[in-house]
Amino acid sequence: MSPARLVHVSPGAAHLPPEVLRLLDTWLPQQRWYPVPAEGVTHEPWLTVTFPGVADVVVALLRLAGPGLAAGSDSLVIQVPLVLTPTAEPEADTAETEAAGLIGTVATASGTATVHDGGVHPAAWHAYLTAALPEACEPEDCAELAGARRISGEQSNTSVMLPTLSAHGGRGGMLKILRTVALGPHPDVVIPEALTRAGWDGVPRFLGAVVLPVPDDLDASPLAHLAVLSELVTEATDGFELACAYASRDEDFGERAAELGAVVAQLHAVLLDALGPGPGLEPASFMGVLRRRAAEAFADVPDLAPHRAGVTALFDAVSDRLSAVAEHAGGLVPLQSIHGDLHLGQALYSPDGWKVLDFEGEPQRPVSERVAPDLPLRDVAGLLRSLDYAAAVGQATDPHWAGHAQISFLEGYREAQSRVRAEERGTRPERSEAVPRPEDTEGYREASGASTSGSGLSVATAELLLRALVLDKALYEVVYEFRHRPAWMHIPLTAVERVLAS
């Protein structure tokens, strides 16, 4: 079905009275998914989306403007679904209206209107679901919403669990409303769709998406994606919560970590086959991004100042090594599509094993960086850091818990990678290298050499690259914790110190 029949796009603040926009100015900065500090930020209406046949649901796409924020076509855009209903009298502040996401009641030129957050309102869920999977609902009724509920605790987007989808054989679905809208095809649509098309079962099956068409050119590729619908993974446990539970009991997480490592290796192999290789890594550009991120982290967090020289020295060593590889190997290290923000919270553990989800990349990174081909080692680094977090948050008393889990993850990754390569060559799998000692809490340094997903790097070069990517991730985490959870900042700050001391 053409996107023109599923959504209607209008410029500016069409269908949104100025009183509603003023109400949003106060409400938006209080939301967990709001992507920037609110001071000095204004909300500029860009586009308004409505759904044919749905009178009360209006989606505002607002550009954020303010100090340090990009402008024009590069500006940060947030999606604000609203349910606007005429109201004779202001609604009482009851538990029922709170549950429906009441934002407020305003007097407009056409009368009093009650404004609800569409992210938690069934009327908006109905509209998104109908647009993503047109055969799922009748225009005036949607039994699919029986038992639907918003997933609590999510920080970047709003997800709604749908217990049953008759159009999907009665199995459930997960509707994710993308709160930050990136121009162009969204990776959390493109990648799961490609993996589903390839028949890989390590990702929740892609079912559909809500497309924002290019105005006046509906046959063009989508201007953006607004929401994605995937199959519900039943009886699943959040990977981070699972690892924290193991850590709290000092229970060995090695088997689960090894299984996850195997799934991540398969993910990289299927992505490479489904989407093809990217360009070669250009050392100066690659290191330029790492150095810029580090400089931004030092500018934001004073506690990082003592580590500036160590970070510079490590990045200089990586730069020299990559330049030598490019010069003597006669080519550059190949890049490919990866997850981009892989941590335990982006994986679910179910009776069917691990499932990887949320392919949108790190929300604080520029979109161009999040969607660019990269080194599979970046995903490896992300999970190593996440296992460290699980040990800290789960309060493991065994000092080797994180190190052993990291080693097990890398062994699972390496062995699955060997099997994939053997299948490609039609040979038996190569024998993997010895597993580093569990008491070596930085054991991933020794194990990293076989974790390059066919990059052809030497063990020493891969180990150095992995250290740099672990450091890059830890610096990112320091900034995040400094801004949002100061009590947790010691976790990545200790990791920075540990990487630089190794």
Image: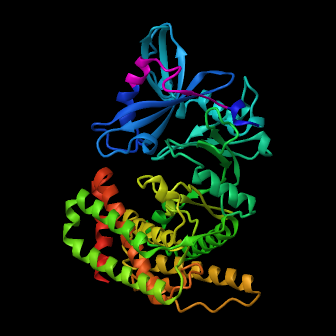
Q: Give the image's coloring scheme.
A: rainbow
Residue 286: x %, y % from top left:
43, 70
| 147 versus 250 height, above or below | above
Which region is colored magenta? Answer: 7-23
Residue 106: x %, y % from top left:
42, 15
Image quarter hosting the C terminus? bottom left
The reply to whether residue 437 is visible in this rendering is no
> What is the count of numbered marks?
0
**Does the magenta-highlighted stretch encompass residue 8?**
yes
Query: Quarter-wise, where is residue 144 in the image?
Result: top right
| 431 versus 67 height, above or below | below
**Does the magenta-highlighted stretch encompass residue 276?**
no
385 horizontally vs 451: left or right: left
Residue 175: x %, y % from top left:
62, 43
270 horizontally vs 12: left or right: right
Residue situated in front as seen by the camera: 384 or 19: 19
The reply to whether residue 467 is visible in this rendering is yes
| 296 versus 499 height, above or below | above
- Residue at image location 44% in from the left, 68% down from the top: 247
- Residue at image location 46% in from the left, 17% down from the top: 17
Residue situated in front as seen by the camera: 13 or 118: 13
- Residue at image location 53% in from the left, 34% down from the top: 119
Residue situated in front as seen by the camera: 309 or 154: 309
- Residue at image location 20% in from the left, 67% down from the top: 305
Query: Quarter-wise, where is residue 225 in the image?
Result: top right
Image quarter hosting the N terminus? top right
| 404 versus 96 height, above or below | below
Residue situated in front as seen by the camera: 84 or 360: 360
Residue 218: x %, y % from top left:
68, 36
